[in-house]
Image (spheres, rainbow, N blue to C red):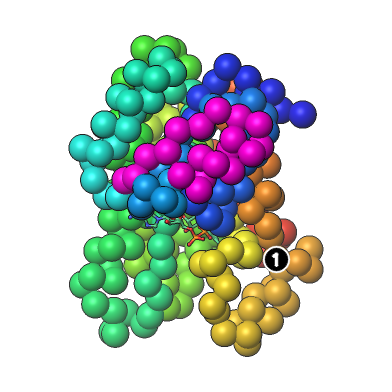
């Protein structure tokens, strides 16, 4: 079992779905987790799940689009725990639609939350990580960023952009001991996919060689690997966790 005792992590979008699964898995591995979500109550939900899983936790309400708030959270975590070992840029949204019907707001919000926020939060943890000469930043992208997807051009742009951030920061921070990697999930059962029409779900399932949708725990296992010393020579890469959907 992965042992992350003594380490600390910040997880954005920790209140539900994949972020909640990651928060619980990190806590179970002994990591202290700062759970970030849009409201006090949702952040507290993530933190409570981490405590239930046996870990120490802090809760922070933050809109990930707010760069100044990212700095505040990083400062508060440093004040409380004195180190930041892991950042998981997980918060994300979809605003699907054909491009001709997509509003400016559909484009801006998806780019801001899925892409720009990863720069803000990575910048916020960079100094403490570099000072500690260790750290792992994990960007939760999507296979849509690799493959493209009709009706998701805004989301695909944001998720593909995360690969650029991942590779650039891996090169920028590599000599300082800070690793930066991405995870590209396929179809994972969460609130994000719950409302898709049945016909879309069936079509997606038919395209997954492993014959099942993914669970949040499948992504959390990838995060544990990238957060731990088991991946100490891995940086700038993308771990695809999709049951073969992108093949
Ligand atoms: P979800 O909708 O269940 O959860 C998203 C989380 O992000 C929530 O906690 C939400 O509160 C948070 N969030 C949204 N906007 C925010 C903001 N402005 N500030 C702070 N937090 C915000 O979705 P999920 O399925 O758990 O997705 C998690 C990540 O995984 C996302 O980045 C998503 O794009 C990615 N992903 C999901 C799937 C899938 O099939 N579910 C596939 C590939 C990638």
Name the image quarter holding residue 173. Answer: top left
Residue 78 in percent (x, y) is at: 37, 20
Magenta segment, which residues? 44-62
Write the residue at 62% across / 62% down: 188
Q: Secondary structure at mark 1?
A: loop
> Is the CB atom of the residue marked by disc 1 within 8 angstroms of ligand 1's nearest atom?
yes
Quarter of the figure with the C terminus: bottom right
Measuring from the top left, give residue 69's x and y in whole percent: 25, 39
Label 1 neighbourhood size at 10 Å, few (<14), some (14-19), many (20+)?
Answer: some
Q: Position of residue 2 (x, y in %)?
A: 71, 28
Residue ID at (57%, 73%): 194
Q: Residue at x 68, y 60 (%)?
A: 214
Mark 1 lies on residue: 213
Note whether 36 is above or below 246 in the view shown.
above
Up the image or down, 125 lies above or below 138; here it is above
Where 121 falls versus 127 (above or below)?
Answer: below
């Amino acid at each position: 079992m992965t042992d992350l005792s003594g380490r600390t992590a910040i997880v954005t979008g920790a209140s539900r779905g994949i972020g909640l699964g990651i928060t619980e898995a990190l806590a179970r591995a002994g990591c202290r987790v700062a759970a970030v979500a849009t409201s006090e109550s949702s952040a507290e939900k993530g933190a409570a799940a981490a405590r239930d899983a046996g870990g120490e936790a802090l809760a922070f309400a933050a809109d990930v689009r707010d760069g100044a708030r990212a700095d505040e959270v990083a400062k508060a975590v440093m004040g409380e725990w004195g180190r930041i070992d892991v950042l998981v840029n997980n918060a994300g949204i979809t605003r699907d639609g054909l491009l001709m019907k997509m509003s400016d707001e559909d484009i801006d919000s998806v780019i801001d939350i899925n892409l720009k926020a990863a720069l803000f939060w990575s910048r916020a943890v960079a100094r403490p990580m570099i000072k500690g000469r260790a750290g792992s930043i994990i960007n939760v992208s999507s296979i849509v960023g690799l493959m493209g997807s009709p009706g998701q051009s805004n989301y695909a742009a944001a998720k593909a952009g995360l690969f650029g951030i991942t590779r650039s920061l891996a090169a920028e921070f590599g000599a300082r001991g800070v690793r930066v990697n991405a995870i590209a999930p396929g179809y994972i059962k969460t609130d994000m996919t719950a409302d898709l029409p049945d016909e879309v779900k069936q079509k997606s399932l038919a395209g997954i060689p492993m014959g099942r949708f993914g669970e949040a725990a499948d992504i959390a296992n990838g995060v544990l690997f990238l957060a731990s010393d088991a991946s100490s020579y891995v940086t700038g890469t993308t771990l695809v966790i999709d049951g073969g959907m992108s093949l």
